[in-house]
């Protein structure tokens, strides 16, 4: 009984310490039954390359954030229900050793740890507490694969649009299709579609995904006996020309500290972007025509 009381007090203090690093910008994390399992720094692959992020694993949620002052001040808090998480183990990449993929319905991303042991510890703890949570709630063991968000390809992975092959420059900016994660130009991403698992508002998709989405909607409406309105995808609101596609653009200082795990009383080089065609890395001389990249694998 005394050990349980001591643990409860220590757990409360640890969670409150995490809350304090977010100040008024973060959501309240302390709640009955919630346990802070571990905390540490992982590298998250963002649009412009790997960035150090603070990660906090609880017995029911996974929290990550941008780092302002290491160990003292974090912002841009993101909270993921643990039952929504699916992990995929990956071989070491050239820029991301000890990496793995975290998939969720709203966002999917690559992370890497400082060592293989730390990677295995993170993956093991996440899977362990997800399983316990799923069992306690009586939920299905795995989420449907189609409900996971596409993983965005970093800006540095392609110098040209992955649909029309036009070179990116100051006037022709990079955008990301929310359905396939490809890097595309504005002309190839004028379409919008409603993807409830990502946003309650229509989001940017590329023209190839727009065709797939429209065909799917037509089939659904025919099955329901409804009349299909032509160009309904194109009629959705457009985003500003110079939108910010991600909140990961700001540069952040990198740092590395050991992961802290808290005990409960009960207790060859591979790149994830190897499928990108060679011309995406090394575009041809400006002015030459390229074949259109309509048949790139999704």
Image (cartoon, rainbow, N blue to C red):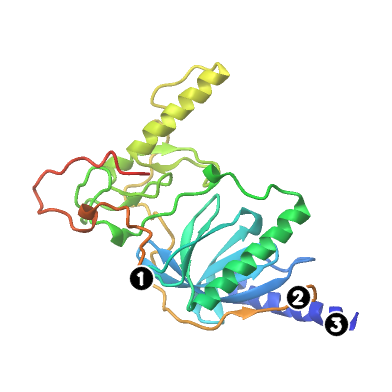
- Above or below, 34 against 291 in this view is below
Earlier in the chain: of badge 1 and badge 3, it is 3
- Above or below, 291 against 79 in this view is above
Q: Give the residue drawn at x 43%, y 44%.
A: 179
Residue placed under numbered mark 2 in the picture: 264
Query: Where residue 238 sits in the image (x, y, percent)?
Result: 38, 40
Q: Is residue 94 visible?
A: yes
Measured in 3D between alpha carbons, the distance from the residue under mark 1 to the one under mark 2, in whole angstroms, is: 35 Å
Q: Is residue 55 visible?
A: no
Query: Where residue 156 sits in the image (x, y, percent)?
Result: 29, 62
Measured in 3D between alpha carbons, the distance from the residue under mark 3 to the one under mark 2, in whole angstroms, is: 11 Å
Which quarter of the figure is the C terminus placed in? top left
**Depth check, front residue: 222 or 188:** 222
Q: Is residue 36 left or right of residue 102?
A: right
Residue placed under numbered mark 1 in the picture: 95
Query: Where residue 188 sits in the image (x, y, percent)?
Result: 29, 41
Earlier in the chain: of badge 1 and badge 2, it is 1
Which of the 4 image quarters holds residue 133?
Answer: bottom right
Which quarter of the figure is the N terminus placed in? bottom right
Q: Give the residue drawn at x 18%, y 58%.
A: 282
* Residues at marks 1 and 2 touching, judged by CB atoms closer than 8 Å: no
Residue placed under numbered mark 3 in the picture: 3
């Amino acid at each position: 009984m005394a050990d349980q009381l001591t643990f409860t007090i220590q757990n409360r203090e640890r969670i409150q310490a995490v809350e304090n690093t977010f100040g008024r910008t973060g959501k309240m994390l302390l709640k009955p039954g919630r346990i802070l399992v571990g905390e540490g720094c992982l590298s998250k692959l963002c649009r412009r390359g790997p960035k150090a992020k603070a990660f906090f694993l609880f017995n029911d949620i996974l929290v990550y954030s941008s780092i302002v002052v290491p160990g003292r001040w974090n912002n841009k808090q993101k909270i993921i229900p643990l039952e929504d998480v699916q992990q995929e183990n990956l071989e070491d990449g050239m820029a991301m050793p000890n990496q793995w993929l975290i998939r969720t319905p709203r966002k999917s991303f690559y992370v890497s740890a400082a060592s293989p042991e730390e990677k295995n510890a993170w993956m093991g703890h996440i899977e362990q507490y997800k399983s316990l949570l799923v069992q306690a709630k009586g939920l299905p063991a795995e989420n449907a694969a189609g409900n996971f968000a596409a993983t965005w390809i970093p800006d540095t992975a392609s110098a040209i649009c992955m649909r029309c092959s036009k070179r990116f420059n100051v006037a022709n900016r990079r955008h990301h299709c929310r359905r396939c994660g490809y890097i595309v130009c504005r002309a190839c991403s004028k379409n919008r579609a409603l993807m409830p698992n990502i946003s309650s508002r229509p989001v940017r998709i590329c023209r190839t995904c727009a065709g797939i989405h429209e065909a799917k909607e037509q089939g659904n409406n025919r099955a329901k006996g409804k009349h299909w309105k032509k160009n309904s995808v194109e009629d959705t609101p457009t985003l500003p020309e110079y939108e910010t596609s991600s909140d990961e653009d700001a540069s952040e200082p990198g740092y590395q500290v050991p992961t802290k795990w808290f005990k409960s009383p009960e207790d060859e080089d591979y790149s994830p972007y190897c499928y990108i065609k060679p011309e995406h890395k090394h575009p041809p001389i400006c002015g030459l025509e390229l074949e259109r990249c309509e048949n790139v694998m999704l």
